[in-house]
Image: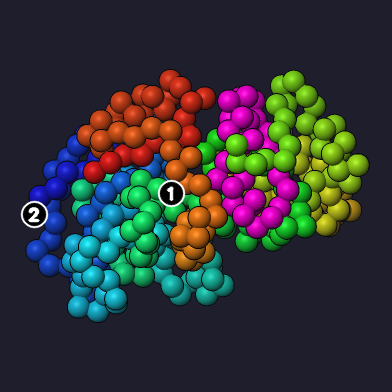
Amino acid sequence: MDYKAVKINKPGDLVISTEHLPDEIGENEVLIRVRAAGICGSDVGIFKGTNSLATYPRVIGHEIAGEVVKTGSVSGSFKKGDHVVIDPVVACGHCYACRKGQPNVCENLKVRGVHADGGFAEYMISRKENVYKISDRISFEEAALVEPFSIAAQVIWRGKITSDDLVLINGCGPIGLIVLQACKVIGARCMVSDLLDSRLEKAKSFHADYIVNPSRRNLEEYAMEVTQGRGVNKIVDAVGVPAVLEQAVRIASNAGAIITLGFTPKLSAVAELDITKKELEICGSRLNSHKFPQVIEWFEKGLIQPGKMISHEFFFENILDALKLNDSEPQNISKIILKF
């Protein structure tokens, strides 16, 4: 059976291609009709050629929701019509990282939509262990946001964030707002910093405790004022600019942690003294390690508001219009959803 997909042959060369499904699927596989998928910054980077991790040609897309069409002979309890979401992390299961429970940084990692074909397609086939059921009370458009919220769940796990923490989120784009919501679910207080007031207003609607625009107010001074000079317990760097990491080391509290999400190759000038004397933890957070069940529980219990993250919807054939809008009006974009 033929189907349509969004394929990038090389940077800047995006087409709606015709692909072909195999006549049979593997015994451990699930055939899924994609119904909605979110556009992520990494998809934009693959299109522009700025994502150094991608390989071409590539069917992009990793924020995926759909329904089961067919299952292999040992594909578990799935049945036709089940609403599902797909974890794009495909790991080997036996390397050091996998044995430690961190398949998201597997030595042989393949991310759907980056290193292997993804979900901007009318149909896709996935290994059963990457497929998770989700209540049909949740729209496909909202369900597509399970994957980005798994990024936030990973941040909380990596940073050991608890209800006792004040969390500073540097950068209030889609991921920053999603991390904010997740931190509020577990009861942490949150300070959000961004240069765009429209994003800060969005953060207020998600119950940020403090907001600051560092172009008008010194973030370092404000953080110390709020904490009475003790510093911020946990700092999430969703910006990826060296100066932001350097500042984070200065304003982190004793026994604090800094969690980085950026992929910049630029060097940061950080003094070891500042790390040692505070006994800081500085850790990266990438993708997710088995966080889908936790996030699905958040969705199904109504603990977060994924629908409020969706700012625009397009039919997938109009993805170039969506990408153009994403470039021209970043201040108005929270999350763009493609519909199939």
What colour scheme governs how the chains and residues are painted in the rendered image of this protein? rainbow
> From which residue to which does the magenta span run?
176-204
Quadrant containing the N terminus in the rendered view: bottom left
For marks 2 and 1 on the same chain, the one whose residue lies earlier in the sequence? 2
- Crowding at dot 1, Cα within 10 Å, few <14 / some 14-19 / many 20+, comes out as many
**Residue 181 is inside the magenta segment:** yes
Query: Which numbered disc covers residue 282?
Result: none
- Crowding at dot 2, Cα within 10 Å, few <14 / some 14-19 / many 20+, comes out as few
Q: Is residue 275 placed above or below 227 in the rendered structure? A: below
In the visual, does 261 lie left or right of 297?
right
Residue 283, position in %: x, y?
A: 67, 54
Residue 78, position in %: x, y?
A: 27, 71
Whether residue 271 is visible to the viewer of this picture, yes or no, is no
Residue annotated with mark 1: 145
Which three-letter amino acid code belongs to the residue tagged 2?
A: Met
Residue 252, position in %: x, y?
A: 80, 46
In the visual, does 284 lie left or right of 150?
right
- Residue extending furthest bottom? 74
The residue at 71%/44% (across/down) is: 190
Please state which of residues 177 and 94 is positioned toward the viewer in this rendering.
177
Residue annotated with mark 2: 1
**Residue 280 is inside the magenta segment:** no
Which secondary structure dominates the residues rendered in magenta?
helix
Q: Secondary structure at mark 1?
A: loop
